[in-house]
């Protein structure tokens, strides 16, 4: 290790300790009970959690309140039995989805997603299995996301529906799918993430990046790229791996909350990542 890396270590330790304190501060029920992750937490069965989590993640843009309202409308369409609905519903039941609207995601888009999920569960038995297949082939989570997307798009769909499936191969930051993977793969002592998937390791994940986490990451010196795109996700995660190689995405919740306006004072007094030295 060269002298610059040795001199950077105290600062890295200080930043790690700061972020660990923020994880403990923000990982309380009152902070996430009204978060989209609360939707899959309504269920106990793995398949129900996967389906509810996947669909909720895909509509997770806008205010958290509007996301939760729309997620409950989704569940109502499925009779609050996502797995049964996906595999057993009659065509006329599935067409209930045509009345759904969440921002630019319309009923035709939802109907396509439900049919795609039916294909996946019929062919693979779980969402975990299809993600693991593409990760095994690609060796990289972001490329695996693009592979799963390609497979889903084999189901007949309108051209407009493609935009609701992020494509890291085209430079997308894939925030919503990375958030879903965090939910499924990670297991934490605060009971936030599910840790249901054992075929994907937490050290393979990439950190979801949005307006709030991007603001905090740039203020902390963890991210220099100005755009929120695939390259930014890779840069941020590589630096988070310096803090925790086995579970870099553990800092997602801290970055998200630190980037919110009400926590600007905390952020202003935080240690900085010595990016130039590492």
Image (cartoon, rainbow, N blue to C red):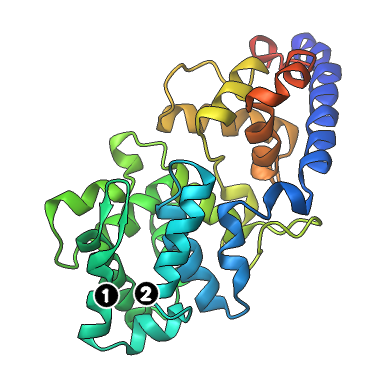
Q: CA distance from mark 2 to mark 1?
A: 6 Å
Q: Position of residue 217 (x, y in %)?
A: 61, 24
Mark 2 crowd level (few <14, some 14–19, many ≥20, 10 Å Cα):
many
Q: Are marks 2 and 1 in contact (CB under 8 Å)?
A: yes
Disc 1 element: helix
Q: Position of residue 252 (x, y in %)?
A: 64, 39
In the depicted structure, whether residue 131 falls above or below residue 254 = below
Disc 2 element: helix
Q: Position of residue 190 (x, y in %)?
A: 79, 55
**Mark 2 vs mark 1: which is more N-terminal?**
2
Choose between 177 and 29: the one closer to the eye.
29
- Residue 73's quadrant in the figure? bottom left
Residue where numbered disc 2 is placed: 77
Choose between 65 and 37: the one closer to the eye.
65
Q: Position of residue 92 (x, y in %)?
A: 21, 84
In the depicted structure, whether residue 29 falls above or below residue 220 = below
Residue 176 shows up from this direction: yes
Q: Residue at x 50, y 77 (%)?
A: 47
| Left or right of 218, for residue 12 | right
Residue where numbered disc 1 is placed: 96
Q: Residue at x 51, y 28 (%)?
A: 211
Residue 141 shows up from this direction: no
| Left or right of 98, for residue 210 | right
Q: How many marks?
A: 2
| Left or right of 253, for residue 27 | right
């Amino acid at each position: 290790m060269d002298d610059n890396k040795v001199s950077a270590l105290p600062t890295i330790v200080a930043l790690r300790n700061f972020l660990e304190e923020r994880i403990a501060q923000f990982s309380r029920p009152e902070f996430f009970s009204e978060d989209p992750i609360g939707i899959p937490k309504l269920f106990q069965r793995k398949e129900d959690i996967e389906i509810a989590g996947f669909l909720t993640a895909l509509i997770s843009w806008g205010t958290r309140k509007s996301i939760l309202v729309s997620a409950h409308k989704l569940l109502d369409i499925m009779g609050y039995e996502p797995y049964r609905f996906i595999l057993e519903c009659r065509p006329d039941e599935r067409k209930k989805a045509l009345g759904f609207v969440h921002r630019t995601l319309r009923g035709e888009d939802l109907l396509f997603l439900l049919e795609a999920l039916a294909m996946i569960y019929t062919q693979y038995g779980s969402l975990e299995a299809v993600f693991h297949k593409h990760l095994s082939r690609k060796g990289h989570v972001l490329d695996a996301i693009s592979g799963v997307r390609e497979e889903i798009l084999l189901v007949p769909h309108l051209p407009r529906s493609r935009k609701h499936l992020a494509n890291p191969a085209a430079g997308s930051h894939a925030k919503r799918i990375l958030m879903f993977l965090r939910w499924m793969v990670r297991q934490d002592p605060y009971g936030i993430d599910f840790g249901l998937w054992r075929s994907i390791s937490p050290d393979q994940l990439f950190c979801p990046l949005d307006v709030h986490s991007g603001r905090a990451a740039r203020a902390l010196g963890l991210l220099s790229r100005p755009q929120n795109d695939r390259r930014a996700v890779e840069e941020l995660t590589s630096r988070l791996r310096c803090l925790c190689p086995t579970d870099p995405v553990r800092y997602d919740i801290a970055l998200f909350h630190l980037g919110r306006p009400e926590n600007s004072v905390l952020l202003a007094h935080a240690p900085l990542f010595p990016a130039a030295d590492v």
